[in-house]
Image (cartoon, coloured by chain):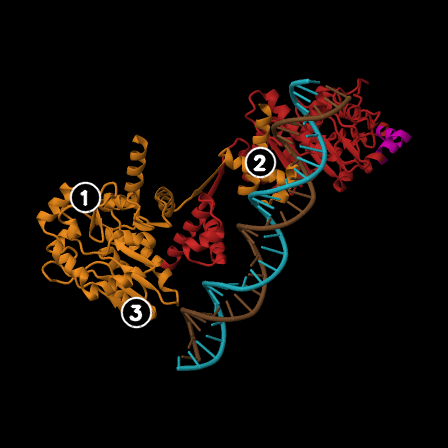
Chain colours: A orange, B red, C cyan, D brown
Amino acid sequence: MDKFEVKLDQAARAAWLSYVGGRTQDEIAAQLGVSRPGVQRLLALARQEGLVKVRVDHPIANCMALAEAIRDRFGLEFCDVAPADAGTSDSEARYLAVAAAERLSRYLDRSEPLTLSLGTGRSVRATVEALSRIDRPQHRFVSLVGNVARDGSANRYDGVMILADKTGGERFLLPAPVVAGSVSEKEALREQTLFRAITEVARQAEAAFVGVGRIDRQATLFQDHFISEAELDELISGGAVGELLGWPMNAQGELVDCSTSRRVTSLPLEMFLEQTLVALAGGRDKGPAILAALRGGWLKGLVTDEHAARFIVDTEMAARESA
Amino acid sequence: MDKFEVKLDQAARAAWLSYVGGRTQDEIAAQLGVSRPGVQRLLALARQEGLVKVRVDHPIANCMALAEAIRDRFGLEFCDVAPADAGTSDSEARYLAVAAAERLSRYLDRSEPLTLSLGTGRSVRATVEALSRIDRPQHRFVSLVGNVARDGSANRYDGVMILADKTGGERFLLPAPVVAGSVSEKEALREQTLFRAITEVARQAEAAFVGVGRIDRQATLFQDHFISEAELDELISGGAVGELLGWPMNAQGELVDCSTSRRVTSLPLEMFLEQTLVALAGGRDKGPAILAALRGGWLKGLVTDEHAARFIVDTEMAARESA
DNA sequence: TCATCTTTCGATCAAATGATCGAACACCAC
DNA sequence: GTGGTGTTCGATCATTTGATCGAAAGATGA
């Protein structure tokens, strides 16, 4: 097939003139003595045969590749990956917050009334803090997670308060602990008029920005006294590796059913399958938890950092290989 | 200027999505939350800042780069460089011939009557031999160089004969040696009716395809007995490094005036400044001769090979540096 | 604080690109 | 030779891209 080699030569020539030489296809057609559609075909061939290699020389390039892989693999509407080379881990977290704030702004910018719900966690808090002030009194913001711990102390990281302050919008907070003392207590809470009203508002939300929690000794849920050590141990032995809005899930993203999880007061995750559920979380340690949420198919969007993204891609690819 | 870094980040993102991800600018605009012209500017910035590197993985790529450099440096209408990695030096020569034949075909393909002139040399001969047969009896072909040596033997490499055979066109040959025995003999030859008639036809030619000769012990002019050893020595001591149609020139491309050059019977080079004079020559050894022809500004087009092209570019760049 | 200057942004239009389709061509079997 | 068949080629149109220009926003200095 010598004919093919000649064609490839021509294709390489056309590709060089087009991509390196910056010529227009008409000029290339004149130079190579073929028609313009002919040049088109040569360029298509050159790309298809991998003669053309494009490289973007910037740290962001890796992030884009990771984001693309995750987006495609888990069918997300979008995925943002913040770069890891920002120096300190502090500035990395800030980078993630800025990226997430960017996403959040897209919704807030709208002038039509908007209902948005927020989860808890440091990432959510940092994200709303990274937002610049904008006047949107017509918007409504709902907290999806009870903002009091078992001991009655208020959650330090509730983003709804800050967000409502920055925009002048309405705020709706759940006056409940994340995990109730008993199933009956949970039922009672859910029957409260206020609780039901807030649930109704949350149901109208267009999107929800939530954190992703680990289930281990460093779990926020545990550290901030939302659950006891015994409850934590029960979750871990039940296979839980992460949580969304307090709902524990195993490595495959399936909800873990146990005595603790039956007392979670948060709105059910199934509710968000109709909405745009966006997770904000980064750091290598959060990787397994984020991956679980992705595998469960709960998320529509993800804002993370390079560490977590790399863990997710590597782990998922390895799992896929062995499958 | 932290603002600039953020912009560069965005630019890198846009570039990645566009060049690697294959997204359209509208999609990128939606993804990054900017207007379409904004994406345009980001992409322009990314290219300008050199974030985007394009590489064409094919031996031809080097040739294209060399061709471009030569074309721009010497203001040629075109320059083709045949690749050097074709294995044997024989197949390389053939590659050059095919490339040159391609150029020649562009003219021959035309159906309107055409007058074309040819020089002598192995390259020209190989080029017309590489041509495929085509019926063009309306065309006329003129030999620009006398086709008899001093001893009366006919030049073995006259392409006009083959070309006319392949196309069915008319042929015009100069019945003269390249270098006459004396100035008066040259004058006499030029006065011949036949000579003048052929000159007139050559003047009407649209393009001329000629070889480039070295001036040294391996010179075709000498090897084929067009000039004697004494004449060769005179030319060399006069600074001649190459010749076009028998006209010797120094390294700067200026015609060398000496007792030998005054007896050259070929049509004057100045005549071709109005036409498209195309040189066909390759090989590292021919480099200095080709470079001289280029520097003299005599050529409008060049078909060469990678060896000669590299020599030309390297030498010219070095000369430019020191200038 | 206001006027002005610079810079940036987005609407609009021209150019370039990619895709589709019918026609021509060559190849092959009959 | 002849008809079928598969492939390639070039005209045409929709989409995408690049460039220009006026308008708005922000910076600067009086």
In the image, are marks 2 and 1 on the same chain?
Answer: yes
Identify the residue under disc 2. A13
Specify the subunit that label 2 lies on.
A
Q: Quadrant of the C terminus of chain B?
A: top right
Q: Looking at the rendering, which quadrant does residue B118 occupy?
A: top right
Q: What amino acid does circle 2 point to?
A: Arg
- Identify the residue under disc 3: A169
Query: Within the magenta stretch, is there residue B135?
Result: no
Helix, strand or loop for the magenta stretch, by majority = helix
Q: Chain of mark 3?
A: A
Q: What is the three-letter code of the residue carrying label 1?
A: Ala
Side (left or right) of B292 relative to B174: left
CA–CA distance in space, label 3 to label 2: 60 Å
Tell me where the magenta segment starts and ends, as one range.
Answer: B186-200
Image coordinates of residue B43 in percent, x first then y, are 47, 52
The crowd level at tag 2 (other Cα within 10 Å; few <14, some 14-19, many 20+) is many
Q: Earlier in the sequence, mark 2 or mark 1?
A: 2
Report which residue position mark 1 lands on.
A240
Q: Quadrant of residue B267?
A: top right
Residue B4 visible in rendering: yes
